């Protein structure tokens, strides 16, 4: 099973407020959001993985992924998140957190699936740890990059890393600049680390070096990029 459209929220939390915010977000904000907006079919939250003991721990990234009803325009669901009544109390509490304790907030944005590797097409996505590669690409080079990435790089990657259980790619809608996300899922955290090790193996040095043709030079295609591992910390309602 796959989800062709998702809504993504990204943020960091002041460490001293993390427990309070997660308690509010998981058990009040999200349940009421999905009660008021049943067009959202599921919610998943993830926390940046492998940052313990590093400075990055203090601004580690959290993701929320909402699965959208396939029969409802995603733009209508996003509008309902912003405007539908019945969530005033939760919105007010969110605003209090946002004033002092939410950082690097990327508000709700629609992402549509543009690629899925055959491996894992039958499985339910967003239930496992994953490695996410994010890029922003200049418009005049996006078609060339997408062709190389989806027809060459990703199939080779999945062949060289048999422990990836699924691979999907999503593109933002209504965001400037556009952002593109690749999610490589693994069975568990041990398999995630094994997969990352395989992806960086000696026999993949040439393949990985080919990425440099897109993000270096005087006029690189990729203007921003990030690569981060995430582990699941919350799922609702199932």
Image (cartoon, helix red, strand yellow):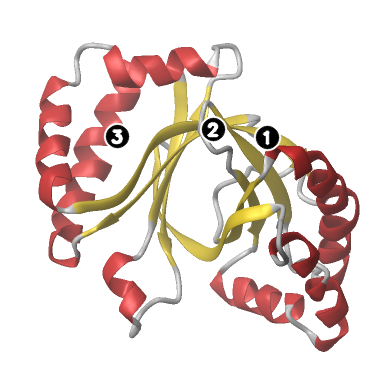
Q: CA distance from mark 2 to mark 1?
A: 8 Å
Residue on which disc 3 sits: 30
Counting other residues with Cα less than 10 Å from the Cα at mark 3, is it few (<14), some (14-19), or many (20 or more)? many
Q: Quadrant of the C terminus?
A: top left
* Residue located 49% across and 62% down the image: 230
Q: Nearer the viewer, residue 47 or 144?
A: 144
Picture quadrant where residue 60 is located: bottom left
The mark nearer the N terminus, 3 or 1, is 3
For the residue labelled by badge 3, is the local secondary structure a helix, a strand or a loop? helix
For the residue labelled by badge 2, is the local secondary structure a helix, a strand or a loop? strand
Residue on which disc 2 sits: 6
* Residue located 83% across and 69% down the image: 210
From the top left corner, tell me how far across and down residue 233 is, in percent.
Answer: 38, 57
Q: Is residue 183 above or below residue 94?
A: below
From the top left corner, tell me how far across and down residue 216 is, in percent.
Answer: 70, 67
Q: Nearer the viewer, residue 163 or 172?
A: 172
From the top left corner, tell me how far across and down residue 138 is, in percent.
Answer: 67, 44
* Residue located 28% across and 14% down the image: 83
Residue on which disc 1 sits: 113
């Amino acid at each position: 099973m796959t989800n062709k459209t998702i809504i993504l929220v990204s943020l960091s939390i002041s460490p001293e407020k993390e427990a309070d915010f997660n308690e509010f977000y998981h058990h009040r904000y999200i349940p009421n959001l999905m009660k008021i907006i049943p067009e959202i079919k599921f919610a998943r939250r993830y926390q940046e993985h492998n940052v313990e003991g590093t400075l990055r721990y203090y601004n580690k990234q959290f993701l929320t992924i909402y699965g959208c009803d396939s029969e409802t325009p995603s733009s209508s669901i996003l509008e309902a998140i912003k405007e539908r009544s019945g969530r005033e109390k939760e919105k007010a509490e969110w605003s209090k957190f946002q004033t002092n304790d939410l950082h690097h907030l990327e508000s709700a944005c629609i992402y549509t699936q543009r690629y899925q590797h055959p491996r894992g097409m039958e499985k339910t996505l967003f239930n496992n740890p994953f490695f996410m590669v994010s890029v922003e690409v200049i418009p005049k080079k996006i078609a060339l990059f997408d062709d190389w990435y989806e027809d060459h790089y990703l199939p080779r990657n999945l062949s060289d890393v048999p422990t990836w259980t699924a691979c999907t790619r999503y593109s933002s809608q209504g965001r400037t600049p556009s952002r593109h996300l690749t999610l490589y899922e693994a069975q568990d955290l041990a398999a995630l680390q094994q997969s990352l090790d395989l992806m960086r193996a000696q026999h993949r040095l040439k393949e990985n070096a080919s990425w440099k043709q897109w993000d270096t030079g005087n006029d690189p295609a990729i203007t921003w990029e990030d690569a981060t591992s995430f582990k699941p910390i919350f799922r609702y309602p199932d």
